[in-house]
Amino acid sequence: MSKAGTSSARAGERPGEHVSSGGRREVIIAKAIEIFARDGYEDSKWADVARAVGIGPTALYYYFESKVHCLFVILAEALQGHREDFERVTKNAQDFDAGLSEALRAGFRLSNHEVARMRILVAEQGRAAIRRKSESEESARMLARERLRELEFAWATYLVRGMDQGAIPEADPAMLARALLGMNTSVWHWYRPGGTVSLRQVEDFFVERQLAVAKIGV
């Protein structure tokens, strides 16, 4: 999956944050992903993230206003990375069918770090539905919701193209996009790297069934 999505997610930064702090900020995000995925967001301590980065707990507040502020940035980055991968593979595909297959497969071709980020996304995305009083938290929350809308819209637009070409049957494109994305995200509730089922096995199993859902009636 693309590592992009980090710069634009900075709409949720604290006012006055300098670009020179970006490297440390990305380290904090990476460690937060590791800890949130391992221990669960609710049970994770913000101080544990600071310890893993090698800074004092109060220093975290230079980069993020709170733990949930950091979480929303992680969600936005995960969604943007997914969309950028989707757009890259569909743009380079020879035809709709090839693009659809590659886009579905790209959703499973993740590093262990990206798998952890997706696990956090599916477990904690519901928090983005709740408004925040903090300006920084609310900005990051709204960005995460915007990234989800963009991802669903990109998928729906591509599916309409396939319908227009007769490659897949007519259906509600938004509903079909959510069905295909939902099959992907369901995996991250239970899949763990190094388990008895490899990610390639998961990819082959799910993509075959996602394609079947998209092509019902053809």
Image: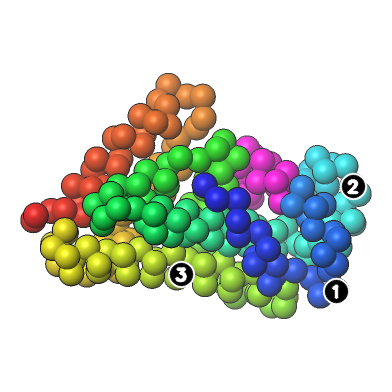
Q: Nearer the viewer, residue 202 or 97?
A: 97
Amino acid type, callout 1: Gly
Amino acid type, callout 2: Ile
In the image, residue 13 sits, relative to residue 97, either above or below, namely below
Residue 93 in sight from this viewpoint: yes
**At which x and y percent is residue 176?**
26, 62
In the image, residue 120 sits, relative to residue 18, either above or below, namely above
| Disc 1: which residue | 16
Give the residue furthest to the top.
196
Mark number displayed over residue 104: none
**At which x and y percent is residue 148?**
47, 66
Amino acid type, callout 3: Glu
Q: Earlier in the sequence, mark 3 or mark 2?
A: 2
| CA gap, disc 3 and disc 2 | 35 Å
| Disc 3: which residue | 150
Residue drawn at 17 percent across, 65 percent down: 165
